[in-house]
Amino acid sequence: MTQACNAVGLSRATAYRRLRPPMVTCAPPPKPSHRRIPDAERETILAVLDSERFIDRPPREV
């Protein structure tokens, strides 16, 4: 292996890495944040923010 790598100009470590099959790893799905607002409450908040009373104000000012 050493002679072949020297002839091609390749590091032995690189040659051995390329011989191994690639490791397939699946990332676990992200956990939902513990600070997330429940969907029902979120819909209620969005309905209030979209109401006529607050339609022209940014959410930070409500």
Image (cartoon, helix red, strand yellow):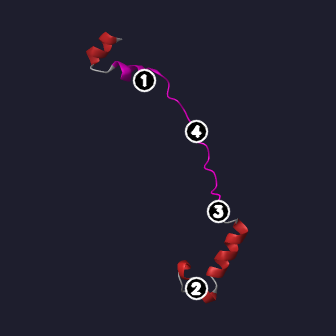
Could you say whether the residue bearing mark 4 is in a helix, strand or loop?
loop
Residue at (56, 35) in percent of width and height? 25
Q: Is residue 9 above or below residue 40?
A: above
Q: CA distance from mark 1 to mark 4?
A: 20 Å
The residue wearing badge 4 is 26
The residue under label 4 is which amino acid type? Cys
Q: Nearer the viewer, residue 8 or 47?
A: 47
Q: Nearer the viewer, mark 4 or mark 3?
A: 3
Q: Is residue 19 above or below residue 48?
A: above
The residue under label 1 is which amino acid type? Arg
Q: Quadrant of residue 51?
A: bottom right
The location of residue 44, given as percent across then percent down, is: 70, 75
- Do callouts 2 and 3 mark residues in contact (Cβ within 8 Å)? no
The residue under label 2 is which amino acid type? Ile
The location of residue 14, given as percent across then percent down, is: 37, 23
Magenta residues, start to end: 12-36
Sequence-first tag of 2 and 1: 1
Could you say whether the residue bearing mark 3 is in a helix, strand or loop?
loop
The residue wearing badge 1 is 17
Q: Is residue 19 left or right of residue 1?
A: right
